[in-house]
Amino acid sequence: MTRLNGPTFSSVLKSFSVSSVCSVALLASAFIGVHPWFQTPAAAQDNALDVEAAMTETAADIPEVPREFRAAWIATVANIDWPTEPGLSTADQQKEMLALLDLCDELNLNAIVFQVRPHADAMYDSKIEPWSYYLTGEQGQAPDPYYDPLKFTVDEAHRRGIEVHVWFNPYRAMHPDNLSGNDTLADNHVANTMPDAVKKLGEKQNMWWMDPGDRRVQQQSLDVIADVVDRYDVDGIHFDDYFYPYPSYNDGNDFPDDASYKAYQDAGGRLNRGDWRRKSVNDFVEELHSVIKARKPHVKFGISPFGIYRPGHPDYIKGFDQYEELYADAHFWLERGWVDYMTPQLYWEIRNPDQSFVGLLKWWNDHNPEGRHIWPGLYTSRLNSENPTFDDDEIPMQIKWTRVLTQPSSGHVHFSIKALQKDSREVATKLKAGYYGDDALVPASPWMSEGQPAAPTFTAQREDDTVTVTLEEAPPGLAWVVQVGVEGRWTHTVVPGTETTTTVTLPAPQALEAGPEATNRVPRGFNEDEPSDDQAVEPAEPANPDALDITVAVFTVDRAGVASEKTVETITSQWERTPR
């Protein structure tokens, strides 16, 4: 994938008013329209080459590789995304997961958020909780023939250079779409092992919830997650917005935690019930962060809370108050640095004045003193129906805004992968043709790294219009990167860490590709030192048009995304001018 050499976003629109969404959108469009990330990649051209010699040079002028967290949620509750129905054969389950991972690879996504604990059950071989009904059609029953879906998914995702963030629901114990019936619960389900800690909500709903104020519940979730971190090579632990339940789940009634609150008071506690509930959740989030980092510091911890912290933040925002209703003080967790990324569910349109996507994204990014990643959740599934509630260009425009407002740590997560799989309103096609035209590295999390990894060593061998690069020695990691340049034209390829060899098609040098009559366009505002308006620039002929240099640069990234120094080799090659 060819990418022109140019500056990356560094400090764009650090502070501005969102009093008029339209005026801000115009400003974004003006910037985005000229930035090289948003231009269509140029196609590599075929040329015949012969290698003569090799030498090393510095990496100072080599362009930066784009970084952006591109992910999709894979929901398993109610078989939303995977598997498509309970009880599929092992072969069909694996086939469906491979199709999802291949889609991510094709679209240049670099992460999935995979739901492995829908409600005190497991989409993997748990030592603590039962196999999920959504997997086999019977809670507690393993796949037959046996396989471990989480290990399978991690192995296959990493083979494609895709991160796996495992998604847990820490408190939900039953969901209305579990159609097997409550009398079929496995013996080791929490409703059987701790029945007094599980509350049935509502008169008609089959929604059960573990009491977040019960220490046994907290310990159960801590043990479950620690077990996964210990036994699986996951890249992240992820929670969504389900802390205390939404009031509608209990017919608008308060959560039934009289017993646990009374126990707290009897032990000398003096907080009111709301503050006590928030403290219970806060303590759990802090402890889980410590548990993860004590085991594997490179494993990210992320939360995707309801997108509005509180009404009035910023002052024109209206809507649901998660602080008072879900007892989730999401900004407090961000402020304390207990998360490595925050994915607020910004499920509203840019043009919505009461829940402005742009205004809310800017608020979260501005209220982030520890500099953690802000990777918003996008409601891509609103494009699914025949009468979608989003305009066709809403999701691409939201991605543009994340790039403007959250650089140099841009990212986003689609809910859910089904919208991309169905290509609803051609959203996947458009993203692949435009904003996902290049592959990208996950932004670095330097607070998680043990230091810069060592630079790799490699060999590069050219044949015709390709270069094959083989790693000789490199530190372990999820990915490594090859950049190839010819006369200012560059390609980059992100290679999964499971591979040691890759072959890259060479970019055509400008002078040979363009011909004597062609011109090269310099985009307006591309660089402060370049012309301020579009103008024709004659391509420069090389001093020796039959011998050009191929520059090959290789670097690795560790599990925290921190890059090594680049190892660079320059190959002097013979070029034959191809008639145009």
Image (spheres, grey):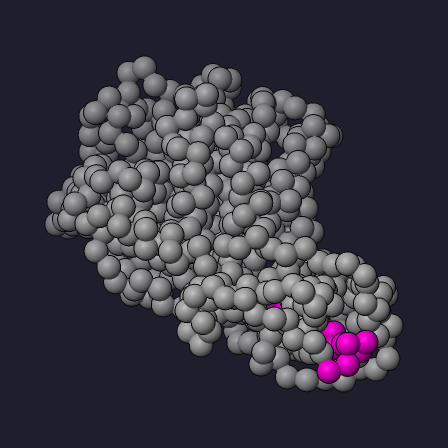
Of 224 and 324, the residue lying toward us: 324
Residue 549, magenta (yes or no):
yes
Q: Which residues are magenta?
A: 543-557
Q: Looking at the figure, which quarter contains the N terminus?
A: bottom right
| Residue 189 at x, y percent in the picture | 47, 31
Q: Looking at the figure, which quarter contains the C terminus?
A: bottom right
| Residue 162 at x, y percent in the picture | 60, 51
Residue 375 against residue 430 in the figure, above or below: below
Q: Is residue 99 left or right of residue 292?
A: right
In which quadrant of the rendered view does residue 306 lie? top left
Disc tally is: 0
Residue 320, magenta (yes or no):
no
Q: Is residue 356 left or right of residue 390?
A: left
Q: Is residue 23 left or right of residue 422?
A: left
Residue 122 against residue 550 in the figure, above or below: above
The residue shown at (13%, 45%) is 272
| Residue 84 at x, y percent in the picture | 58, 25
The residue shown at (64%, 84%) is 58
The residue shown at (43%, 48%) is 399
Of 35 and 567, the residue lying toward us: 35
Q: Main secondary structure of the magenta part?
A: strand
Answer whether residue 301 is visible to the viewer in this image. no
The residue shown at (12%, 50%) is 270
Q: Is residue 208 left or right of residue 115?
A: left
| Residue 118 at x, y percent in the picture | 47, 34
Answer whether residue 199 is visible to the viewer in this image. yes
Of 269 and 320, the residue lying toward us: 320
